[in-house]
Amino acid sequence: MKINTAEFIISNSDVSKCPKDFLPEYAFIGRSNVGKSSLINMITNHKSLAKTSGRPGKTQLINHFKINNNWFLVDLPGYGYAKVSKKTKSVFQQFITDYFETREQLVCAFVLIDIRHEAQNIDIEFMSYMGESEIPFCIIFTKADKISKTKIDSHIAAYKKQMFANNWEEMPQYFVTSSTEGTGKDELLAYIDEVNQEVFKNNSEF
């Protein structure tokens, strides 16, 4: 897939105000400072489509971007950032939950994980929530240019081990990416294109 157009549509904190277009949506979420904005800009060929910041926790709204006029990329707030006030965190964690559990257009979520770190409980817990809620998702490991191939492999193996220990039958599909080097871009876009083709072919609502 080649991305020709990427247009910001709306930001809001109320799922009922999300776009009414019945187009497939792909939501991107991860812990704050995981490199989500840089990844979105990399795969859409835009330097500033998603706002990058050195300050974690900057994204606190549901952000919709229409891609090629036939699907939505959805940029969601990070989870588990300690310096956001408890009240603010409870509000946006609630609308994240509302989005995942009520948004009919969502066909796949991408959970972003910083590959530099060994398996983090907060990521395992979030993916367990996704699995228990039967929300389809893939994993995107980010910042692959920061560590060696050997460490990448060992950290992915550690995630597999922890997920199997948490009663997962298999590891979800995953992608290894680097926004700096463009690693994983083609594979990720090819996956989205493949899912889109299936969605449009098999679901009359889309």
Image (cartoon, rainbow, N blue to C red):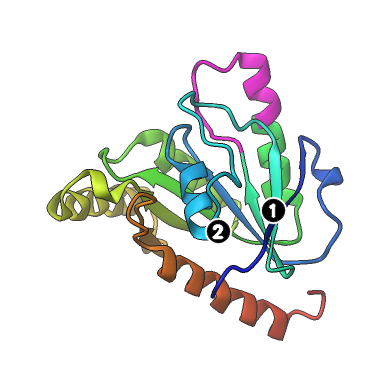
Q: Which residue is drawn at the image coordinates 43% and 41% (left, top)?
A: 35
> Magenta stretch: residue 139 in it?
no
Q: Position of residue 126 (x, y in %)?
A: 49, 41
Q: Is label 1 or label 2 in front?
A: 2
Question: Is residue 137 in sight in this rendering?
Answer: no
Q: Which residue is mark 2?
A: 44
Outermost residue, bottom side? 201
Magenta range: 77-92
As shown in the figure, which amino acid type bears the numbered disc 2?
Thr
Q: Which residue is drawn at the image coordinates 42% and 70% (left, top)?
A: 186
Q: Position of residue 113 (x, y in %)?
A: 39, 45
Q: Position of residue 2 (x, y in %)?
A: 55, 73
* 32 to the left or right of 50: left
Considering the image in quadrants, where does the C terminus appear? bottom right
Q: Which residue is drawn at the image coordinates 46% and 66% (left, top)?
A: 188
Q: Is residue 38 above or below residue 79?
A: below
Q: Looking at the image, is mark 1 or mark 2 earlier in the sequence? A: 2
Q: Which residue is mark 1?
A: 65
Q: Is residue 201 above or below residue 15?
A: below
- Helix, strand or loop at mark 1: strand
